[in-house]
Image (tube, rainbow, N blue to C red):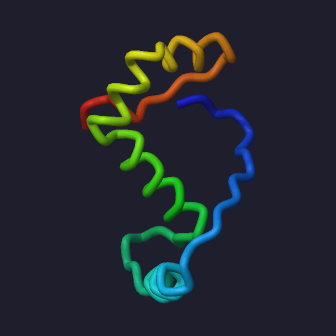
Amino acid sequence: MSESKSVQFRAQVRPDIDFLVRAIIPLKNSGKDWSVSDVANEALIEWLQKAENRQLIESHNLLDALERRGLTTNIYSES
């Protein structure tokens, strides 16, 4: 993945989602200090990895467009 500067991404969420996310973040015990940004990144990556969204990315050559902007991604790499 490209080591470029992070971009601010704003979204409005329902109050119940906000409460649950903010309540769970400090409870996570994975050896990492989680932030709302970490949770949002993880959720967006999972959303982009859905078959229907990956198909749209492929059919519209969006990975090529990403490369033309000097960016890369590893969200489709097998783990």
Q: Which picture quadrant has residue 35?
A: bottom right
Question: Quadrant location of the C terminus?
Answer: top left
Q: Which picture quadrant has residue 22?
A: bottom right
Image coords of residue 24 (percent x, y) = 43, 84
For image coordinates 74% across by 40% down, the residue present is 5
Image coords of residue 11 (percent x, y) = 65, 62
> For this rendering, which residue is in front, 56 or 4?
56
For image coordinates 34% across by 39% down, the residue present is 49
Image coords of residue 50 (percent x, y) = 30, 41
Residue 65 versus residue 2 in the image, above or below: above
Residue 16 versus residue 49 in the image, above or below: below
Number of numbered markers: 0
> For this rendering, which residue is in front, 13 or 21?
13
Residue 27 versus residue 45 in the image, above or below: below
For image coordinates 41% across by 41% down, the residue present is 48
For image coordinates 47% across by 51% down, the residue present is 44
> For this rendering, which residue is in front, 2 or 47?
47
